[in-house]
Image: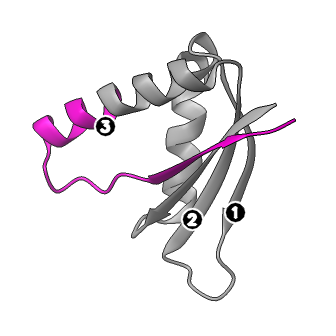
Amino acid sequence: MAHVLAKLMGAPLAAVKQQLEHDAAEHAEQGMYLEHLWQNAENSEEVFFLFQVKDLAHCRQRMRETHAKARAENPGMPLPELTFLDGF
């Protein structure tokens, strides 16, 4: 089972939760399903979230495209650091 772990700095948990809820249908179309959302208990500026993904290669490519587009539109936009995890 494949997952993507995301770490985002500088965004409030409530805002991240709202954005993930807004994007849920689009994520599902891409085979990405949010499993968990956490805030670092020792640093409230650090948020983590975990997606289960159907196709890790497709997800990786889609995230590269999405982040490149976001950076082109707003170079200062905080984007999550992604770790792609492949499980057995």
Number of marks present in the image shown: 3
The reply to whether discs 1 and 2 touch (Cβ–Cβ < 8 Å) is yes
Q: Which residue is mark 2?
A: 47
For label 1, the crowd category at 10 Å Cα-Cα, with few meaning under 14, some 14 to 19 and many 20 or more, is: some
Q: Amino acid at mark 2?
A: Val
Q: Pinpoint residue 10: horizontal percent, then vertical percent.
A: 39, 70
Q: Quadrant of the C terminus?
A: top right
Distance of label 2 from label 3 (alpha carbons) = 18 Å
Image coordinates for residue 19, horizontal then vertical, percent:
49, 41
Q: Residue at x 56, y 15 (%)?
A: 30
Disc 3 residue type? His
Q: Quadrant of residue 4?
A: top right
Marked residue nearer the N-terminal end (1 or 2): 1
**Where in the figure is residue 76, as x and y percent of width and height?**
16, 57
State the residue at coordinates (31%, 57%).
78
* Mark 2 in CB contact with mark 3 (< 8 angstroms): no
Q: Earlier in the sequence, mark 1 or mark 3?
A: 1
Judging by the rendered image, the residue that carries numbered circle 1 is 38
Mark 2 vs mark 3: give the one in front.
Answer: 3
In magenta, the rendered stretch is 66-88
Q: Which residue is mark 3?
A: 67
